[in-house]
Image (cartoon, helix red, strand yellow):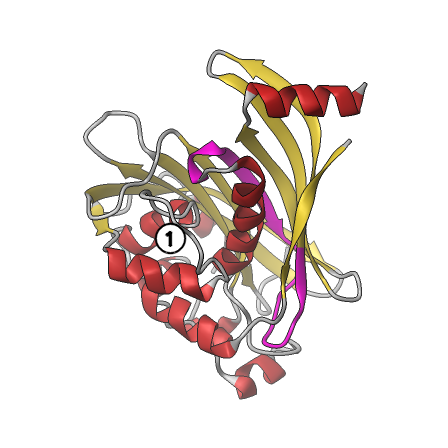
Amino acid sequence: MELAELQALVGTELPVGSYRIDRATHARAVGAVHAGDYNFNVAHPMFGHLAPHCGMGWELVEFFDVVGAGLDDGVLFGQGDLTYNGPIELDVDYEVRGRISSVERKIGSRKGVFDLITLELELLGDEPTPVVVSKETYVFPRAEASA
Amino acid sequence: MTEIPPLVVPAVRIEDIITIMDVMGDVNPIHVDEDLVRELGLRGPVNQGPANLAYIVNMLIAWAGSPESIRHLNLRFQSISCPGDRLEARGNVVRLIHGDDGPVAHCAVALVREGGEVILSGTADVSVTTTMAEVVEAAHG
């Protein structure tokens, strides 16, 4: 995909999504990240990433498709920026809003040409201020592209 | 600088990667497809970034005492972790910020694989108690 086409995607809003962290799912997730002794009545802060990511209005494959990538392209999670404005509650319905917030093309000595594409996602409860703002940046290898 | 007690992950496990895939609805084959990761030149199935992030968070919670203490994370994923890796989450307080909501420790954090490879690094802002803040300030002179 040409860089100009990608850059034109900046600002694209995702469909509004939703997410609810049920206790059983939460327990499985904390167990899988070596936090089996987690004993608090709010969600583990990793859900600051997981909840917006899982609840966003695109499936991951749709996102990849929009930016001209496939599941077998070796896409990696490159950077996470999470701002917590309050606790993430269990068994509460949250709305997820998001957009493509940036596109950057780079050349690495090992990776060759790759794109850094950032989604900015908001996890919203009853208050106007998002409980969490999550900026997730993905690394898209672009073997076919030139810088 | 005040060191945050490190936290060790004895071994990344493929069954945990599969659990997180299930929780996330993550269908990216890079986490489980041995042939694909070999083709991509990676050393093994890729543990999820959010799991690596969670190990850092676990360390911060153990230190600060509460998940609600964590205010901000900025983490750059520099390499991958794979099944069998022994990892250590590390951190130290760079400075204290005295805000309207009380003291906040601005910390440098990293997740390091046995042998020294940095998997991720970045910063964390963590609310601390007044007592913790006094200890940090004393250590920083």
Which is nearer the eye, B30 or B136?
Answer: B136
Three-letter amino acid code at the position of disc 1:
Leu
Which is nearer the eye, A60 or A65?
Answer: A60
Q: Is residue B100 visible in the rendered structure shown here? A: yes
Q: Chain of mark 1?
A: A
Which is nearer the eye, A11 or A34?
Answer: A34
Which is nearer the eye, B112 or B135?
Answer: B135
Q: Which residue is mark 1?
A: A50
Question: Who's the residue at 22% across and 50% down the image?
Answer: A20
Disc 1 crowd, CA 10 A, few/some/many (<14, 14-19, 20+)? many
Say whether residue A87 is left or right of residue A80.
left
| Quadrant in which the C terminus of chain A appears | bottom right
Q: Position of residue B81 (x, y in %)?
A: 62, 67
Q: Position of residue A124 (x, y in %)?
A: 26, 36
Tell me where residue B134 sits by quadrant: top right
Q: How many marks?
A: 1
Q: Position of residue A80 (x, y in %)?
A: 51, 46
Q: Is residue A64 visible in the rendered structure shown here? A: no
Tell me where residue A8 sits by quadrant: top left
Per the image, is B15 magenta? no
Q: Could you tell me which secondary element the residue under label 1 belongs to?
A: helix
Q: Position of residue A9 (x, y in %)?
A: 39, 46
Question: Who's the residue at 34% across and 42% down the image?
Answer: A99
Say whether residue B36 is left or right of residue B138.
left
Question: Who's the residue at 55% across and 26% down the image?
Answer: B128
Say whether residue B65 is left or right of residue A60.
right
Residue numbers of the magenta segment: B67-88
Question: Who's the residue at 47% across and 60% down the image?
Answer: A1
Up the image or down, B69 lies above or below A95; here it is: above
- Residue placed furthest toward the top: B100
Tell me where residue A83 sits by quadrant: top left
